[in-house]
Image (spheres, rainbow, N blue to C red):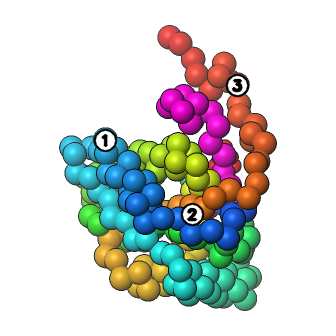
Amino acid sequence: MNTLEAIASRRSVRRFEDRPIPRETVEAILQAAIQAPSGKNRQPWRFVVVSGEKRATLVKILLDAVAEAKSRGEDAGSAEGTAHVMERAPVTVFVFNPIGTDPWAPRSVDQAFQELVDVQSVGAAIENMLLAAQELGLGSLWIADVLYAYEELRSWLGEAGQMIAAISFGYAAERPAPRPRRALDETARWL
Ligand SMILES: Cc1cc2nc3c(=O)[nH]c(=O)nc-3n(C[C@H](O)[C@H](O)[C@H](O)COP(=O)(O)O)c2cc1C
């Protein structure tokens, strides 16, 4: 599979087979992540791999945070459904920016710019992981809904810095149709 084929055939997968992923395959995906470009080569990423029985705790933490948000009358978006996707995924990788600050922390303009750059670098690492997974025959789901349990998950995972996202991986048990995309002429212009 070449890169353009991997880009074109990748889908967000939300149903996974009940089949573990070999450790070497997860390591190959992480190797792809750390080869991403990064601003000033800061490589502002740390990964925490959750698999096996730890998944149940992860899902409970997210579902408890969703229930708490709802009890306060807040909207928890798609987080409940996403938690159930994560429940069935054999591996979920969390991505942190170790030099990032909490979203609510006051920051200087310089720090804000650095974080803008660093989040781009982390996005590149995540996309590398999705494309590597595609090449290796795995489905994946990029997940921002973990932010609903930002403090709870960060403390359980024992990571300092800024929690950015999680990505679930597994052997796909569905073949989703492509989601619509805005046409190129709506999204790009040539000066
Ligand atoms: C930054 C980011 C965050 C996302 N967060 C979630 C999420 O929390 N839950 C979920 O089900 N999908 C999530 N997605 C997947 C998107 O819904 C999906 O990429 C989009 O609908 C396009 O579908 P496709 O990936 O199959 O092309 C996320 C995607 C991105 C890039």
Q: The disc labelled 1 sits on which kind of residue?
A: Pro
Of the two numbered discs 2 and 3 in the rendering, the one whose residue sits closer to the viewer:
2
Local packing at callout 3 (Cα closer than 10 Å; few below 14, some 14-19, many 20+) is few
Q: The disc labelled 3 sits on which kind of residue?
A: Ala
Residue placed at 65% from the left, 76% from the top?
87
Do the residues under discs 3 and 1 have CB atoms within 8 angstroms?
A: no
Of the two numbered discs 3 and 1 in the rendering, the one whose residue sits closer to the viewer:
1
Q: The disc labelled 2 sits on which kind of residue?
A: Ser
State the separation of the CA atoms marked 3 and 1.
Answer: 27 Å
Q: Say whether residue 120 is magenta.
A: no
Counting from the top left corner in percent of width and height, residue 90 is at 58, 70
The residue pinned by badge 2 equals 168
- Which residue is nearer to you in this view: 66 or 71? 66
Which quadrant of the rendered structure holds the N terminus?
top right
Residue placed at 58% from the left, 74% from the top?
148
Residue placed at 53% from the left, 80% from the top?
52
Local packing at callout 2 (Cα closer than 10 Å; few below 14, some 14-19, many 20+) is many
Badge 2 marks a residue whose secondary structure is strand
Counting from the top left corner in percent of width and height, residue 24 is at 40, 60
Of the two numbered discs 2 and 1 in the rendering, the one whose residue sits closer to the viewer:
2
In which quarter of the view is residue 84 placed? Answer: bottom right
The residue pinned by badge 3 equals 183
Q: Does the rendering let one see residue 143? A: no
Tag 1 or tag 2, which sits nearer the N-term? Answer: 1
Q: Say whether residue 11 is magenta.
A: yes
Do the residues under discs 2 and 3 have CB atoms within 8 angstroms?
A: no
The residue pinned by badge 1 equals 37
State the separation of the CA atoms marked 2 and 1.
Answer: 22 Å
The relative height of residue 5 versus residue 99 in the rendered view (above or below) is: above
